[in-house]
Image: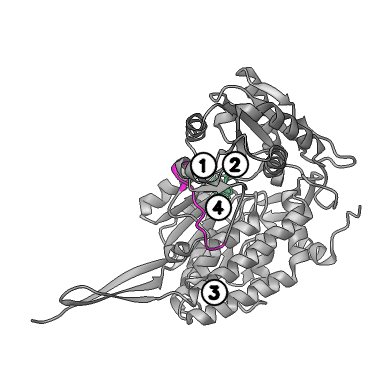
Amino acid sequence: MSLTYEPSVQDFLSRGPLGSFVGGENRALESSAIFPTVDPGSGELLANVKEASPAEVEDAVAVARHVFERGKWSGLAPNQRAVHLHRLADLVEARKSTLAEIESLDVGKPLSQAEWDIGNFCQTLRYYANLSVHVQYRNPIAVAQHEARTVHFPRGVCAFIFPWNFPLLLVGWGIAPALAAGNTVVIKPAEETPLSTLYLVQIAEEAGMPAGVINVIPGSGEVTGAALSRHPGLARMSFTGSPEVGRLVARECGLNLVPVKLELGGKGAAVVFADTDVDATAEALVSAITLNAGQVCCTASRWVVDDRIYDQFVSSAIARMKQVRIGYGQDPATQMGPVVSPKQRDRILGYLDKAKQQGGESLLAGGRASVPEKNGYYVKPALLAGDASNVACREEIFGPVAFVLRFRDEEEAIRLVNQSPYGLANSVWSRDLERANRVAEKMVAGNSWINAHNVFVHGVPYAGVNLSGLGGGVLGPNTFFDYMRDLSVVRPLQG
Ligand code: NAD
């Protein structure tokens, strides 16, 4: 296994310290604080990054506003913007191997999964570029005695705060509709994983995007994220992350009456009926809980299994969890990489302890894993069982840990699923499609999937309810209009 980076990756990493990229140039101040970004697979430094201070946040929003107001982007026709977005997608595709390696190194995820993320980013750009040239921006309204219409306009400077689990993919889900609608954007990536976003903004101009349309301000949540959240000059804020921080961001935005969109955590369930193919379902759910080392907001971390197949399902799942190949993200044999940080590893190990203290049964112990010659943050998959009130069944762990529950009839299964205060995504597994569809509609969440888990389709809205989010979600056609303001124009007709 070669551990040398691709020359283009090496070149990017050695440009450091990286920092705010605003108005088409590196605008980090000499005096900015420096924080390291680390390869979680080896614990080694990848690059130093300068944290955007509140003054730099101010500068970024001012530049984004200036560019918006001069109309260099907002004033283009939708098809002109769409050409730019397709060109950006073309260039990202051409640089896919560089971006995928950067993403894999920064998050720890297997290279093949990082490649999938970059491909998804391009699809998102293309989906909203195409949508933007087909929607109506002026809609006449048929009402008596008035001539009336609504008109959609871009809003202005849209701010985005992202988590570390799918850095570039989530940037795409967030900014693509905002850009296609004619807004300028300011992005704060997670402090653990700023690299792919910083690379993206550096190549955006090469792709022909006007300078200052996409701006990136790396830094911590407490400094950079907080300064962005409380900025009164934002036209919109979109936050993706935990409910705890989502509340803080929403509160700050509320004080300025800045509209906010929140995409938050989850505690998804999979309901497995006895008539399903048990081994195939176990295989699919083990893949889901080990994808990205379990650090997936919508993954199925509660497996709600028909009592009649419970034992068969559990032994099939355990056998598969034991076979998952844990390793370094750049090793092609790796199925599951490390978790993102020592903090995240300790959080997962802490939940395993707390679950046991509360009487949970450890069906597969999990715990730390080691990978030869790599001093990274590796954990093994774990399977827990016990009462639904157990902390590991209630709270989002964000690691490769599933909690299995039994049910005896459909009502009990639905009751167990809906006990959660979260509401992001659940799945139902059954050959009886009538029942699967019935159960899918009774589970309270933004998304119900049938005989699959983690299904993301451009054009199908993906959103959370309750503790999992508010404000309309992502990926749907309506998301595009979230980034536009509406104006009604009305003229009373005489006589
Ligand atoms: P987090 O909430 O800790 O951090 C998210 C972002 O908020 C980071 O950029 C962080 O720097 C920033 N932040 C922290 N404190 C802040 C503050 N006071 N003001 C402004 N910004 C602040 O979340 P995380 O640990 O990075 O990510 C994991 C969480 O994200 C999980 O709960 C996961 O379910 C959720 N998530 C949700 C979705 C979705 O689409 N619903 C997608 C991915 C992740």
Does the closest atom of ligand 1 sit within 8 Å of the Cβ of label 2? no
Residue found at x 48% / y 50%: 262
Three-letter amino acid code at disc 4? Thr
Mark 4 / mark 2, whichever is N-terminal: 4
* Part of the protein shown in magenta: 458-469
Three-letter amino acid code at disc 2? Ser
Q: Residues within 10 Å of mark 1 (few under 14, many from 20)?
A: some
Callout 1–callout 2 Cβ contact below 8 Å: yes
Q: Residues within 10 Å of mark 3 (few under 14, many from 20)?
A: some
Mark 1 / mark 2, whichever is N-terminal: 2
Q: Label 1, on which residue?
A: 435
Spot occupied by residue 222 in the image (x, y as percentages of width and height): 55, 46
Spot occupied by residue 197 in the image (x, y as percentages of width and height): 65, 61
Answer above or below: position of 338 versus 302: below
**Residue 465 is covered by the magenta coloring:** yes
Three-letter amino acid code at disc 3? Asn
Distance between mark 3 and mark 2 Cα atoms = 36 Å
Q: Label 3, on which residue?
A: 130
Which one is closest to the eye, mark 4 or mark 3? Answer: 3
Dot 3: element: helix
Spot occupied by residue 440 in the image (x, y as percentages of width and height): 50, 44
Q: Label 2, on which residue?
A: 430
Q: Residues within 10 Å of mark 4 (few under 14, many from 20)?
A: many
**Residue at the left extreme of this rendering:** 495
Spot occupied by residue 351 in the image (x, y as percentages of width and height): 64, 28
Which one is closest to the eye, mark 3 or mark 2? Answer: 2
Distance between mark 4 and mark 3 Cα atoms = 33 Å
Mark 4 / mark 3, whichever is N-terminal: 3
Residue found at x 67% / y 38%: 399
